[in-house]
Image (tube, rainbow, N blue to C red):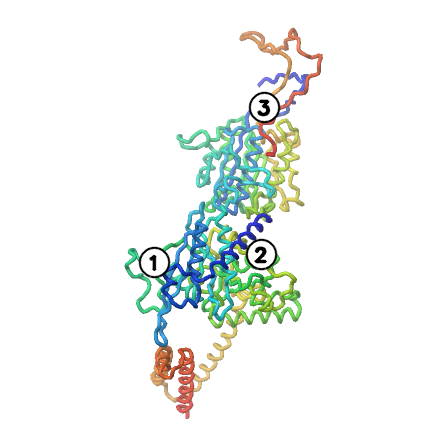
Amino acid sequence: MSGTSLSCDQGVSETSEKTHTNNWAVLVDTSRFWFNYRHVANVLSMYRSVKRLGIPDSQIILMVADDMACNPRNPRPATVFNNAHQHINVYGEDVEVDYRGYEVTVENFVRLLTGRLAPSTPRSKRLLTDDGSNILIYMTGHGGDGFLKFQDSEEITNVELADAFEQMWQKKRYNEILFIIDTCQAASMYEHFYSPNILAIASSLVGEDSLSHHVDPAIGVYIIDRFTYYALEFLERVTPDSKKTLAQFLQVCPKRVCISTVGVRLDLYKRDPSRVLVTEFFGSVRNVELTTRVLDLPKCGGSRQVAVNKSVNTRSSKATKPLHYASQLPLHHS
Amino acid sequence: MVPISRRMRCCLVWFRVTFRVTRRHCTTCRVCRRKRRVTRHPCLTHGWWGQFTQLGLDTFTHSFTLQYPMGRGKNFTGRNVYAILRASRGSGTEALVVTAPYRPPAALLPGTAPSIALMLAMAKFFSRQVYWAKDIIFLVTEHEQLGAQAWLEAYHSPQPLFPSQPNPASPSLSLLLSGDLEGRAGAIQAGINLEVHSAEVTHLDVKLEGLNGQLPNLDLVNLIHRLCQRENVPHTFKNRADHPRPESMEGWRHQLTTLLSMVTSQASGVPTGNHGLFHRYGVAAVTISGSGREAGGGVGVPIRARSISLQQVGRVLEGVCRSLNNLLEKFHQSFFFYLLPATNRYISIGVYMPPFGLIAGGVLVKALALWYKTSCADDSGKGRHSLLQWAPVVVGTHATCFLLMTCPPTLTRLGLAFDLTPEDSVGLGLTACCVALLLVAVGAAR
């Protein structure tokens, strides 16, 4: 990938040490029943953030274990809210759930990660990553020391998860993974990872419970968890051209607000988190350089260099407005 | 919160007005025209039936017969009215029951007209909500516990395939013929019995004890107390509020009295309300009762300038029903055996059973000591006593007990000759038997 460095142009984004070419997200909610409303709200809020920052639905795998929007107990049918003041309906009209209801099982999850799916599986249910993909894996639900509960009937252990990631590494299915888990005793899930280029964030350490944030009295259940609430507060202020780093994201939930201690695993990740942008995992930000100059593309067989065409006169006398990305989704519904 | 209370107020006013209207004597229906003397009570069941149907609920009546075994053996009939609010988005496999006993004006116990008005208002309010996952059955029973028992029996018994077939579950010798139900909902998860005697109550009393001392799950009791606390409604147990300083000596004595009062009511085996009949079917149920100022407040209940309105009671009920609606399973997490010294404290069976075990252990130790003593004294060669010499005593005791158990109907028939009521003849007859047996025992001892 030859990077043309025309860094003297206006509105040009810096090329940093990015090594990925595409972004994927795997967002998993593992619990069912009405009183686990907050896990569905967690995962749908993450989905909205990730979609807003540019990852298309074709590259998001959303696994939701139960249908809260159409649950008979929902006083606002076809909606899922993550805030008691009900600012945003995170269910919306363009949610694409890939694995729904009882399809969210440990077997399906591991098959999704490793790519060992039946030939008839549709593309929307496949993780079609390559060795240039940065994958954001977000899991939420009920967990314990060394396991995560799926659907109230089975569990995935930390050893299985670590082995699945190793299979992905061996088959060159990822460039880097950001693994976020918001459950009780979440840090136990990343204990056994041994594949390189994985940065793991857990909402609580072994022996601690992750707590919910607040209850909505009109709906009657807790509607968001603490770690995800503060993570979303941070992400709502991130735009596609934001310069916020992962190191800032790791500080998003200090103990005084989260009550549980956020655990981080950095030893498998060789880059410095303070030099990694949040949008490298949460967004699908391309290396795009914006320019007003006309470029001469080389002919086949000619010189391989792209040269600036100095003959065409651009409106360089008048200072043009700085160029920036248009926002793909509005931040808040009014 | 505020929009809900405004709607509730409108519903209550509507029902207070219409309820007064339907108390007039019904002159149109065939049943009332046939009965010349309608002084027992006006045809209210038809009024309620009409109002429930107007709300769009599935309304049914249920008739039951009591074959009274004593005295002349009269047959008493009764009628329950119940309406089922079907959850439009739910699967209809589970149900909740809100019930109130109907008491005619001449009844000995205080009237429950405000409970029925509250129930009708709740039905109207609930029928407009979309968040019900379970069906709600609104039940008005007649003849106190008989109506509730008959309805529950009919609900839980298998229905005959053809209407002309007799109910296979009810034997021909039964006293209470519960009949058949025309309409049912799913499995009952919980029941609330309302006994609000006045439109303005001083406090809400929660009654738990059921038939033979059975208790509902403690979670349901805690739910009601916590909701009352949230709605600032004074709540009591056994008509006694919590002592403000429970760690002091007065507080301890206050709690001890409450505890003993619960023990005595459980020991009597008589349910303190219609809710007591639900426990045998595995349904957690309690009675919420409230009386006006003229009944005198509960012990320790602070006297407030403003009484609790029906709207506040309705808010508590709404909270209870919504919490029960959110449940996925029947109550099974908390205790089924407990003693309550206060509304916010409990003594579980794991705590009160060991002392009882130690008392029984003392008796066992004494028995062992006696056995050891007699076995040692036996060595002097008196010879073994055979057990058979005690057989006449055992057989005689059992025969006497069996006779006493089956004598009440005979005693009442005997009492008819002396023009005594069945209660008096049974009481006098049993006292006479007691005295006779004592004299026999004293005579045999001599």
Dot 2 alpha-carbon crowd within 10 angstroms: few under 14, some 14 to 19, many 20 or more: many
Based on the displayed image, in which of its 4 quarters is residue B339 positioned? bottom right
Q: Which residue is mark 3?
A: A286
- Element assignment for label 3: loop
Which of the chains bears the disc numbered 1? B
Q: CA distance from mark 2 to mark 3?
A: 59 Å
The residue type indicated by label 1 comes to Pro
Give the residue displayed 35% in from the left and 80% down from the top.
Answer: B413
Q: Which residue is mark 1?
A: B158
**Which numbered circle lies on residue B312?**
2
Instruction: Please name whichever residue, A306 or B33, is drawn nearer the observer in this view of the structure.
Output: B33
- Element assignment for label 2: helix
Give the residue displayed 53% in from the left and 32% down from the top.
Answer: A25
On the same chain, marks 3 and 1? The answer is no
On the same chain, marks 1 and 2? The answer is yes
Q: Mark 3 or 1, which is nearer the eye?
A: 1
Residue A325: percent from left, percent from top = 62, 24
Dot 1 or dot 2: first in sequence order is: 1
Q: CA distance from mark 1 to mark 2?
A: 39 Å
The residue type indicated by label 3 comes to Arg
Residue A5: percent from left, percent from top = 64, 17
Instruction: Please name whichever residue, A235 or A176, is drawn nearer the observer in this view of the structure.
Output: A235
Q: Mark 1 or 2, which is nearer the eye?
A: 2
Q: Is residue B259 above or below residue A318?
A: below
Q: Is residue B439 above or below residue A255?
A: below
